[in-house]
Image (cartoon, rainbow, N blue to C red):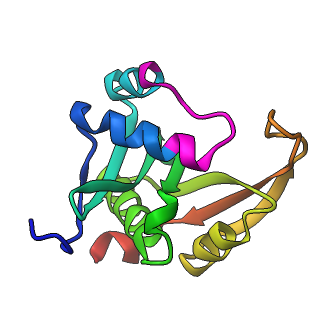
Amino acid sequence: MNSHEIVVRQLEIEDIPGIIEIEKACFPTPWTHHAFRAEMRNKLAVYQVVETEGKIAAYGGMWLIMEEAHITNVAVHPSFRRRGLGRKVMEALVAEAKKKFSQRMTLEVRKSNTIALELYKSMDFVISGIRPGYYHDNGEDAIIMWKELTIADFLL
């Protein structure tokens, strides 16, 4: 991989320190090393990472339950933002959901996270509700979003 090549791939155990670095930079209550190891053992969980410039720059994860894919987390390291890496993570998660024949995808996002909200809307996620006080660190509401995966999505 050259220094500016962007690689999207499945999370590996060796990636966890890079993921923890992103967590600490992005979230007031970051997940722990133990939490990510548990997710890797979870047969319902799928995690993708974006690697560039020799570093893990972004990641995302979801749970595949029945016909639904629930996105659990998406984050881009602050020093790699505004390069389209969040979109690359989301595209990888959508592709994985399609491979597993999910019919719809869902996620929650902080009401204040306007950049993420715009990304999700641009990828055909639609606001369907609010979870009041969802985020424990500050009591912020979560916006619930859904994306339907149509037959046409599976033919792409």
Q: Which residue is painted at 80% across and 62% down in the image?
A: 112
Q: Is residue 83 above or below residue 16?
A: below
Q: Where is residue 119 in the image (x, y as percent from the top left)?
A: 58, 74
The answer to whether residue 71 shows anywhere in this view is: no
Q: Quadrant of residue 33?
A: top left
Q: Residue at x 47, y 47 (%)?
A: 22
The magenta segment is: 23-34
- Residue 43 shown left or right of residue 90 in the figure: left
Where on the picture, by quarter, is residue 17? top left
Residue farthest toward the bottom in the current orientation of the protein: 122
Count numbered badges in the picture.
0
Residue, x 50% and y 25% (percent of image)?
Answer: 32
- Residue 61 in the image: above or below residue 94: above
* Horizontal and vertical percent position of residue 124: 58, 76
- Picture coordinates of residue 87, whole percent (x, y): 45, 71
**Which quarter of the rendering shows the N terminus?**
bottom left
Q: Nearer the viewer, residue 112 or 71?
A: 112
Is residue 27 highlighted in magenta? yes
